[in-house]
Image (cartoon, rainbow, N blue to C red):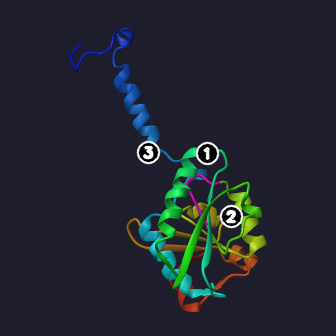
Amino acid sequence: MNATAVPSVFQPFPGLTRRLAMAMALAAWVVPPSQAGSLQPEELQILGKALNFMEPALNGPVSVAVVYRDGNDASRRDAEALAAQIDVIDLGGQHATAAVVSSLSLADARFQLIVTAAGVDSEPVIEAAQAHRALCVTADVDAVRAGHCTMAIRAARKVEIFVNRGAAIQTGIGFATAFRMMVHEQ
C-alpha cells in the first residue's frame, strides 16, 4: 500500500479519514469554559512581581499548592509541569516550594498560595483558599469574575491582571493601592 492509499476499512466512507482528522484537530483546540488553560511561564514571572504588592506579604519560603482536577490525568500533568516551573522562579522575593495537590485533597494540604492547573474544579479551590486565607491564582478570568479564585493573569497580547475584590476580602488578602490601580478589579 502506498502512502496515499486509504485503508480498505475506510473505502465505503470516502473522506472519512480526512473528516475524522479534522474533527480531532478541532477538538484539540476547543477548551470548554470551565477548563481554561493554566498559567504560562511568563505569567508565573508576572505573578512573582505581583506578590510584591500583596498585603500581608508572604513570609519565609512560600508553599504553593498547584491544584489539578481529581481523576483528570491531563490536569495532573499540567499541574506537575507548573510545579516544576514554580520551584525555579522567584515569587515575590521568596523561595517557593510547589506541591501538586488534587482538588479533593486541597482542604487538608498546607500552603500559602494556590495556583490552578488546566481544568480544575473551582468550588473546592475557593473554599480552601478562604479556609487557609491564601491567594488563589489562575489563568481562568471567568473563575475570577465568578469569585471562584482571587487573581487571574493573562499575558497573551498584553499583560492583564484581574482581581476579584470580594474573594480577596474573604481570604483576608489585600493589595497595595498602586497595584490595584494597574489591575482589572471585579
Identify the amino acid type marked 2. Answer: His
x and y, in percent, of residue 118 in the image = 55, 54
Mark 1 lies on residue: 72
Residue for point 54% across, 86% down: 52
Instruction: Tell me which numbered mark, 3 or 1, is placed earlier along the sequence.
Output: 3
Residue 69, position as x, y percentages in the image: 64, 51
Q: Which residues are magenta?
A: 115-120
- Disc 2 and disc 1 in contact, CB within 8 angstroms: no
Looking at the image, is 175 positioned above or below residue 129? below
Residue position marked by numbered label 3 in the rendering: 29
Q: Residues within 10 Å of mark 2 (few under 14, many from 20)?
A: many
Q: For the residues marked 2 and 3, what is the alpha-carbon distance in whole angstroms?
A: 24 Å
Numbered disc in front, either 2 or 1: 1
The quadrant the N terminus occupies is top left
Examine the structure image and report whether residue 118 is included in the region drawn in magenta: yes
Kindly identify which numbered label has been placed on residue 112: none
Asked if 47 appears above or below 5 in the picture, the reply is below
Q: Position of residue 68 (x, y in %)?
A: 62, 55
Q: Tell me whether the residue at label 2 lies in contact with that at label 3, contact meaning CB atoms closer than 8 angstroms.
A: no
Residue highlighted by disc 2: 148
Between residues 4 and 113, which one lies in front from this camera angle?
A: 113
Q: Nearer the viewer, mark 3 or mark 1?
A: 1
Horizontal arrangement in the rendering, residue 10 relative to residue 162 (left or right): left
Tag 1: amino acid? Asn
Q: Is residue 178 above or below residue 146?
A: below
Mark 2 and mark 1: Cα distance apart in space = 20 Å
Residue at horizontal 51 percent and vertical 70 percent from the top: 87
Mark earlier in primary sequence (2, 1): 1
Kind of residue indicated by mark 3:
Trp
Which residue corresponds to the image point at 68% horizontal and 58% vertical from the top-left? 122
